[in-house]
Amino acid sequence: MKAAVVLLADYKTQNFARRILFELEQEYQIDFLASLLPAHVSLKQPFSFENMETLENYFDLLATQIAPFKIQLNEIYYAEWSGYGILGVNVNETDTLRKLHVQLNRELSKLFTDTSAPHDGDGYKFHMTIEMGNVKKSNPFRTYYNKIKDKKLNLSFMAEHIALFYYTGEDHLSFINYKVLPLTGRQ
């Protein structure tokens, strides 16, 4: 079993990402994949775990320890990873985001056998994926990205909800938004 821990975007940011997704689909008839989940900023990429009850208990406690905080989105990006083209938005890294990533890696590794995930650690770049897809035959994501004249953004939101995504299979292509909780910690 695999799960990811994320911060959900607000409605304004969700709508921004969905508008781009709509344009992508209208112009290139893409299949939806990452956008089947709500727009979010990942704190911990999909990791293996052995027991949902243990993970849920940890997740429930985590939500009570984090106070809502501001996330700034600064630029649309394009990347490729493992045969997929990815269109997304870069997130300004803050001490809060970095500390949460480090905390999750440390604490989850004490609860489960191997919670390593791609891109973990100091090099992890905070981002919000708009959409991704296989780019073996064509690459609508890069084409769309190249057509954007001004890739800079001035968009932010208050992270007020944390979510637990559940993934089936090794390919990470089947997933659900398993649980959402409000951030109720104090600053």
Image: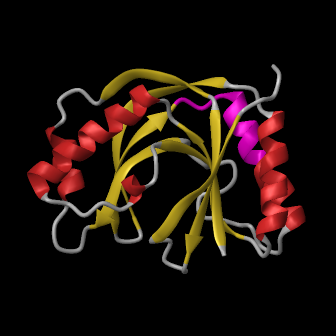
Does residue 77 appear to the left or right of 180 in the view shown? left
Does residue 26 appear to the left or right of 34 in the view shown? left
Q: Quadrant of the N terminus?
A: bottom right
Task: Determine the residue located farthest toward the bottom in the rendered image.
Answer: 169
Task: Provide residue 109's location: percent of width, then percent of height.
Answer: 83, 63
Residue 166 appears anywhere in the view: yes
How many numbered marks does the figure carry? 0
Task: Provide residue 87's location: percent of width, then percent of height.
Answer: 33, 49
Foreground of the two, 55 or 103: 55
Q: Within the image, what quadrant is residue 75 found in?
A: top left
Q: Quadrant of the C terminus?
A: top right
Main secondary structure type of the part rendered in magenta: helix
Looking at the image, residue 115 lies above or below residue 105: below
Looking at the image, residue 86 lies above or below residue 72: below
Task: Determine the residue located farthest toward the left in the rendered image.
Answer: 27
Looking at the image, residue 98 lies above or below residue 12: below
Question: Colour scheme in the image?
Answer: secondary structure
- Write the residue at 84% across / 64% down: 54
- Write the residue at 75% across / 71% down: 49
Task: Determine the residue located farthest toward the right in the rendered image.
Answer: 110
Q: Within the image, what quadrant is residue 28 found in?
A: bottom left
**Magenta residue check for 151:** no
Please provide the residue range marked out in magenta.
92-102
Foreground of the two, 1 or 151: 1
- Write the residue at 76% across / 38% down: 99
- Write the residue at 78% across / 76% down: 50
Residue 106 appears anywhere in the view: no
Looking at the image, residue 76 lies above or below residue 2: above
**Magenta residue check for 95:** yes
Task: Provide residue 124's location: percent of width, then percent of height.
Answer: 61, 49
Task: Provide residue 27's location: percent of width, then percent of height.
Answer: 9, 50
